[in-house]
């Protein structure tokens, strides 16, 4: 199904730069320093504060896919915690991106499944729906279709549309080469008296 060159470990910032600085998700951060993910999106749209749809997603999500959730940007209810992320770990999901909140953060870091969220709160979710699985959504102002490439690192999350993965990777690699030259020039700087 995923027959394109993958962005792999390219930085989220560089991938966004390579798309004229679009595609960068607003306001969603890693829950701990060093959390990083890269993989195709598996989308869920849920009623704010409710995680019935996330449990449904774990019925069909595949190894390596990134669970990307539009939870309406709600920060008052955590839609994931330790128990649901245990499922993600067992299924070898590639990571979780929430336009919503999380809880049990110490346990999440120990589990090691990379989680990106808008907020953290001890308040638990409702479990009634409604929800949608596998439909186009948006997170942090960026559209996400199933199969779009999602990259997250210390800076946050960038989404690369599926049809633009190859050209974006090529452009990002060129930017990285240019940055290497600028880095070398910076290292030649000396103080002036
Ligand atoms: O209660 C919930 O659904 C969220 C949670 O804390 C967990 O999954 O551990
Ligand atoms: Mg919990």
Image: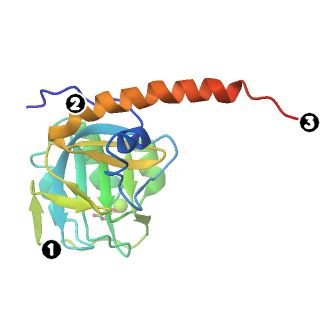
Of circles 3 and 2, which is in front?
A: 3
Residue displayed at 45% across by 43% down? 110
Residue displayed at 46% across by 53% down? 31
Of circles 1 and 2, which is in front?
A: 2
- Please report whichever mark, 3 or 2, sits nearer to the chain's N-terminal start: 2
Residue displayed at 38% across by 53% down? 116
Q: What percent of the width, then of the height, locates residue 7?
A: 30, 31
Q: Looking at the image, can residue 31 be seen? A: yes
- Please report whichever mark, 1 or 3, sits nearer to the chain's N-terminal start: 1
Q: What percent of the width, then of the height, locates residue 27?
A: 42, 62
**Distance between the alpha carbons at the discs numbered 1 and 2:** 40 Å
In-image side of 188 versus 25 (left or right): right
- Which residue occupies the foreground of this view, 109 or 7? 7
User: Disc 3 marks which residue?
Assistant: 193
Q: Quadrant of residue 188?
A: top right
- Please report whichever mark, 1 or 2, sits nearer to the chain's N-terminal start: 1
- Which residue occupies the foreground of this view, 14 or 92? 14
Of circles 1 and 3, which is in front?
A: 3
Q: What percent of the width, then of the height, locates residue 142?
A: 27, 58
Q: Which structural element holds mark 2?
A: helix
**Distance between the alpha carbons at the discs numbered 1 and 3:** 68 Å
Q: Which structural element holds mark 1?
A: loop
**Distance between the alpha carbons at the discs numbered 3 and 2:** 48 Å
User: Disc 1 marks which residue?
Assistant: 128
- Furthest-right residue in this view: 193
Which image quarter holds the N terminus?
Answer: top left
In-image side of 152 versus 52 (left or right): right
User: Disc 2 marks which residue?
Assistant: 166
Q: What percent of the width, then of the height, locates residue 150?
A: 28, 43
Quadrant assignment for ligand 1: bottom left
Assess whether mark 3 and mark 1 are in contact (beta carbons under 8 angstroms): no
């Amino acid at each position: 199904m995923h027959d394109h060159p993958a962005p792999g470990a390219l930085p989220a910032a560089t991938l966004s730069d390579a798309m004229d600085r679009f595609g960068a998700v607003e306001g969603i951060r890693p829950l701990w320093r060093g959390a990083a993910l890269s993989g195709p999106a598996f989308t869920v749209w849920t009623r704010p504060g409710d995680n019935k749809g996330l449990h449904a997603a774990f019925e069909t999500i595949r190894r390596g896919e990134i669970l990307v959730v539009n939870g309406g940007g709600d920060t008052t209810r955590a839609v994931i915690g330790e128990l649901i992320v245990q499922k993600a770990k067992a299924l070898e999901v590639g990571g979780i991106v929430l336009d919503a909140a999380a809880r049990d953060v110490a346990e999440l870091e120990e589990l090691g499944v990379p989680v990106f969220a808008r907020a953290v709160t001890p308040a638990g979710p409702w479990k009634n729906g409604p929800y949608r699985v596998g439909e186009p959504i948006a997170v942090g102002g960026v559209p996400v279709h199933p199969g779009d490439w999602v990259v997250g690192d210390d800076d946050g999350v960038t989404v690369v549309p599926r049809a633009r993965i190859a050209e974006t990777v090529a452009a990002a690699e060129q930017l990285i080469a240019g940055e290497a030259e600028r880095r070398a020039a910076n290292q030649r700087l000396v103080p002036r008296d």
